[in-house]
Amino acid sequence: MTDISQIVMLPALMTYLGQAAPSVGIEILHIAETTPLVLESGDADLAIGFMPQLMAGFYQQTLFEQRFVCLVRKDHPRVRSKLTLPQFLAEAYIEVTTPGTGHHQFVERALKKQRIVRKVALQVPSYLGVGLIVANTDLLVIVPQRLADIAARENNVRVVPLMVELLSYQVKQHWHERYAGDAANMWLRSVVSRLFSL
C-alpha cells in the first residue's frame, strides 16, 4: 500500500475485517522498486495505490479517482480561500518524493510542463505527517484530495484548490497474473473492491 492508501483506506478495511474475518491479519509493506517482484513471488497479495510502472504480467482494478489540492495552515498569514499564481510561486513547499509510486513524478511533470517552479523548503519521502508539519508552519504541500480531507479533519489545516493544472489519477489494486485464480487473493480483492470502488 502507498502511504496515502494506508491513511485513507486502512481504518475502513480493518473495521470490516474485525467484523467479517477476525482471524485475518494484514501486513503492510511500503511500495518500492521491488514491489513487482514481491507480488510475483507471492510474498504480497496486492499493491494498492498509484503505480503506473506495474504493467505486463499484472492485473489491475480501478478503485477511485484522485486529484491534487494544496494544504495550508488554517490561519496562514498570506493564503486565503484561493491560491493565485503569484502566491503559489512566492510560498515555500514541502515536496513529497514517495519512492516507488508515481505521485512525485506526476506532480513534477505537470509543473514542469507549465514552466512552474516552486520553492521547496523541505523534502520528505512520505505523506505521513505532512498535515502536522503544515499545521505548525507556513509551508504548503500538494497532496491528493482524500488525504487532504482527512488532514483537514485532524489538524489545523485547510484545503485550497490549486490554480495550476494537475490532472486526476486513478488509485488501483494490482496483483500478479499468477495469483489471479487464487481463492484467498480473489477474496481479498473483492473485499477491497467492495469497500473502496466508487
Image (spheres, rainbow, N blue to C red):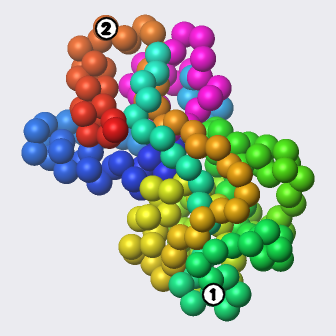
In the rendered structure, which amino acid carries the disc numbered 1? His
Task: Mark 2 and mark 1 in contact? Answer it, CB < 8 Å.
Answer: no
Say which element carries label 1. Answer: loop
Q: Which residues are magenta?
A: 37-58
Circle on res. 76: 1
Say which element carries label 2. Answer: loop
- Please identify, in this view, whether the residue under mark 2 or under mark 1 is nearer the observer: 1
The residue pinned by badge 2 equals 181
- Indicate which disc, 2 or 1, sits on the residue closer to the N terminus: 1
Q: Is residue 30 above or below residue 121?
A: above
Q: Is residue 121 above or below residue 164?
A: below
Q: CA distance from mark 2 to mark 1?
A: 52 Å
In the rendered structure, which amino acid carries the disc numbered 2? Gly
Q: Residue furthest left?
A: 19
Can residue 29 be seen here? The reply is no
Q: Residue at x 20, y 36 (%)?
A: 24
- Front position in the image: 59 or 126: 59
Q: Is residue 119 above or below residue 15?
A: below
